[in-house]
Image (cartoon, grey):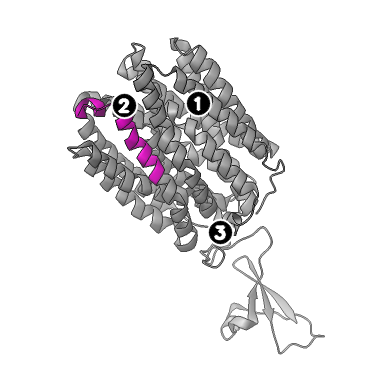
Amino acid sequence: KSQDLRVSGVSFLVHNSLMDSHSKPTSASPEDFTNTTDTELKVIFPKDDLLEPCTDFLPPDSKHGIQCVIAMFLIHIATASMGYSYGILIIPLTQEFNVGRADVTWIGAGFSATMCLSAGLFGWLGDTYGFRRVAMASSCVLFLGMILSSFSTHLWQIAFCFSLLVGPATAGAFIPSTGCTGQWFVKYRAIAIGIGLSGIGIGSFLFANVGAWLIILLGWRRALQILAVFCFIFSMTGSIMLRRRLPPNKNSINFDFLKKLGPFWTMYCTNFIFQFALIIPFAHLTPYSEDLGNSTAYAAWLVSLLGISSLIGRVVIGLVADFTKTYVRLYQGLMFTLSVIVLVLWYWLGQSWAAQNVFAFCYGFCTGSNSSLTPVILCNFYGPERMATVNGVIFSSFVVGNLLGPVIAGYIFDLNGNYQSAILMCSAVWFCAFIVSMFLPSKNTLVL
């Protein structure tokens, strides 16, 4: 009672009520579907093949996905890099508004908090209504927020722009791009997402060096305006290049993964803990180095090194993860390594120039690798069709740590006049996150 038809590489199974049970399948043409009702036509796809609503058949791990990797790379250069390079603004803003470092750090913390809180919403919007339109709209809001910040006359105005405009817009651009890229790859998912996320490393390198140079030459206001233009160009170009592989399906996007204990909640708790430590070096390594007598340019170089080493880590660990398929074990091992790196290279040896460089490289390498494995593990557990939604909800676990971690470190400095206690706290937090991550299932089942 059925016949196979090959049209543009897609297999169709046509139920024909006119054929009896003993009839042999007969040939058919596309014109035969003209009068076929929805109840008479059922589309059958191979298990590993999914279809975008167009006439071309687009398999996973094909050349079509390279475009989305490039798009994700460009978007991350423009968006997430702003958060990682915020440290270059701390001293100029403290001098401009005559406030303490903790007060200025609240702005970066607010940016991170609103970015994380809104990530789940933008992930759901991308999965449901399309990645491209969400990312394009967010690129425009990102540009607006940065420009308005540059004209601020009070510190609260900068906090308002970064918290309510720049933060959510950042999530609205990079969360959909990550979900879109995850749909295009199965065998090479970790390396594809790692390459896309490495845009953060390039962006941090460019923002920290070019931004510091522009601040010295033109002042922080004009520097922020120039950086806003570059952010808009990169983010909008990447948004336009996004092309989803799975058709939007409002019925398939749900939040049932929140209803029971499992890998999601273990990942959520792990991320909740280590966010108290993650941003501290990115926010405070620049002023820490300057306090030791190093120049602003040299201190900015350490932030650049954090960014460029994170790029290397995302690519290298992505290759290792796809080759060994030990996603969870790598994720756990990186957090233990980060605890040791902070303790040894920053707390014990951080006074020397060589140790600062080694620490910046190792910390950036491990944190970059860790952040690139998170969406891959989630995608393998819960499937690519709602990857942006699940990954976005995970981001809400970052809020408290991103909000309080750098601020606590700033208050510790204001009280003690040094960062030693804050560094110990950073190491202890990474070790606690490692302990919790050990409850993750070691076998990360792949969902195609």
How far is disc 3 from disc 2 in space, using C-alphas? Answer: 39 Å
* Residue annotated with mark 3: 255
Q: Residue at x 40, y 56 (%)?
A: 134
Using the image, determine if residue 54 lies above or below residue 39.
above
Locate the N terminus and report the quarter of the image it occupies.
bottom right
What residue range appears in magenta? Answer: 93-114
Q: Earlier in the sequence, mark 1 or mark 3?
A: 3
Left or right, residue 290 beside residue 128: left
Q: Earlier in the sequence, mark 3 or mark 2?
A: 2
Callout 2 amino acid: Arg
How far is disc 2 from disc 1 in space, using C-alphas? Answer: 18 Å
Of the pair 60 and 261, the residue shown nearer to us: 261
Using the image, determine if residue 133 lies above or below residue 233.
below
Mark 1 against mark 3, which lies toward the viewer?
1
Question: Is the magenta region chiefly helix, strand or loop?
Answer: helix
Residue 101 is tagged as 2
Callout 3 amino acid: Phe
Where residue 277 appears, x then y in whole percent?
49, 30
Q: Is residue 64 visible?
A: no
